[in-house]
Amino acid sequence: MIVVIAQWFFGLIFDARIASNLNLILYRGWDVFREQNPYQWHLPSVVITFSLIAITGIYKYRQLRIGGAQIAKQLGATRVQPNTFHPLEKQLLNVVEEMAIAARTTVPRVYIQLHQSQVNAFAAGHTNHNAVISVTRGALEKLTRDELQAVVAHEFSHIVNGDIKLNNRLVAATFAISFIGLLGEWILEHAAASKRGRNNSSGFELVAAIALISYGYIGTLLADFIKAAICRRREYLADANACQFNRNPEALANALKVAAGLRLPHRNAHYHQYSHLFFNQTRTPWVSSFSTHPPIINRIQKLQPSFKAPKNGFKESTNVANYQAMQLTATREYLSENTTPIIKPTVRANTAHLSAKLSLLVHDPYSCFTLIPMLLLSDEFDIRSNQLSYLLSSQYVDAFTLDNAETELAKLCDKQRFELIELAAPSIDCLPAKQKDELAQLCWQIILMVENIQINQPLNHPLLVWLYLEIILMQTTRAKSKLLLKTRNTKQLIQAWRYFVSLIAVIGHNDAKEQQNAFTATCQQFNMKGLTLLPFTQFDSQYAHQMLAALISLPVKNRNAFLQAIEFAANWDNEINEAEQTLLYSFALLLDLPSPITD
């Protein structure tokens, strides 16, 4: 029925004989019209309809592939710099970092919607590597730290479960069938903004907006129904996963109660289009069947079975950070009036294993030129001296910062160093494209100064850090696009599979016979016949670099199968050691898949 209405609508708009067709339908009836025009009216409208749907859908999907930053900007969000000095913003960054470690995923970019007083948040992006998390000003002002952590954990659930990619496709599909109504909403919002700003807005804008909203109403309803049908159960799943990440269902329930007490609408023409991305309902639909989120009372009762809805409804809560909220508003107004924002990293990060000096370095983009390459230095004196000399030759590295970084890094264990690289990802992402490439080249040259890395039992530190850093650089810099293969070579993919399965078999088993048995069992399990275990006496970083490039080119189905093979080889002896855990986690990041290690 909807397709027929759409065909009729576009047929009337684009048919040159619109006046005669209307006259024929109104005065002589539909049957006479069909007899005189059996196919002429039908075919053009069908072609035009599907062409417009296809073009708008493809356009929107390609636009969203860039990453979640595109959506954040459309919704009026502002990027939070990693070296921000404001306490509320710093607290938000700390919470995001904590949940990233708990969810075993990379730290996304963080945004704030300063003009929104609702308690809300959203996660967006095409992959885990370009994902963003945005929260509203109301969430920062009205939620306690535990409640804010629960909301952020909910958004991380969407990232880990792959909902952000599903949402991107859903946005593209629904935009294609509702773009006429959305265009009318955008024009109406523009006219309202002009009126609030006391600018002269033409009455034609209002008439055009109402006409477009009316014409596109069927498509808008269909889009809302599709989003509601798909997203409701995903919200329950995200709530459950959030409790696994932060171990505090009470905090999530309290955050939902605070959000329920605020009935302020979101004022942005794009909010209808992205309504299913948010933590809480952005608008109240006329019919509950078109709601993109489950009733908030039902969500609270899932977390607190004994909860009963208040008779008089939820009441708006007072700010828990009134002074800090006023400071945030005043600071933002000051920064918006100055062309050169002053960012002073003076607040200590709430990360247990980071000292004050190390926290400043990891959250400062240009300090990463010193900190990240320092993690790759060799233990041998001669090689380390050459690496330090090359590092000091960079224009972004000074001896004082290098000396502080070396002193602080010596206090960290391997696991803490891996977390440090992960925490540095948002800072690296803030660098301009040219500096990102220079950082990737600097790290690569530091690694190449070590010709070969001896494989010991267990895997030694330089190899482990190199593999992890390689993956982080591919996420945050242009190095990833340079590694992509233009064509997928089946022979090279098999070589990569053999190479890394052999590597994890050698790392995870001390005895040569156990290594061979683990590799053989993995080949049999995944039907990879005719392969033999590679004798790993040395690790060639350049060859491993090529093998990583082959893995990136794998389709999703094969990427998942490869990760399962790596996990099978590591778990062959029913024990996964620390080195195997790190490799599994690193491969999951590289392949943009959930980590198989959950604890």
Image (tube, rainbow, N blue to C red):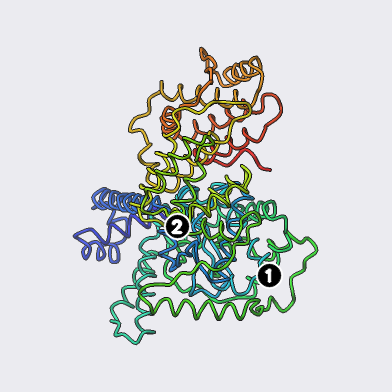
- In terms of image quadrants, where is residue 251? bottom right
Judge by depth and name the residue closer to the eye, 332 or 170: 332
Q: Is residue 146 left or right of residue 187?
A: right
The image position of residue 467, as x and y in percent, is: 51, 36
Judge by depth and name the residue closer to the eye, 381 or 292: 381
- In terms of image quadrants, where is residue 430? bottom left
Callout 1 crowding tier (Cα within 10 Å): few <14, some 14–19, many ≥20 = many
Answer whether residue 114 is visible to the viewer in this image. Answer: yes
The residue labelled by disc 1 is 257
- At mark 2, the secondary structure is loop
- At mark 1, the secondary structure is helix
Q: Who's the residue at 54% across and 52% down the image?
A: 423
Answer whether residue 1 is visible to the viewer in this image. Answer: no
Q: Which residue is the extreme one toward the top?
A: 530
Which numbered disc covers residue 220?
none
Which numbered disc covers residue 365?
2
Is 162 drawn above or below residue 560 in the view shown?
A: below
Q: Which residue is the extreme one toward the left?
A: 16
The image position of residue 272, as x and y in percent, is: 46, 65
Q: Who's the residue at 74% across and 62% down the image?
A: 250
Q: Which residue is the extreme one toward the right?
A: 306
Name which of mark 2 and mark 1 comes first in the sequence. Answer: 1
Quarter occupied by the C terminus: top right
The image position of residue 227, as x and y in percent, is: 51, 56
Tell me the kind of residue under disc 2: Pro
Q: Are marks 2 and 1 in contact (CB under 8 Å)?
A: no
Tell me the kind of residue under disc 1: Lys
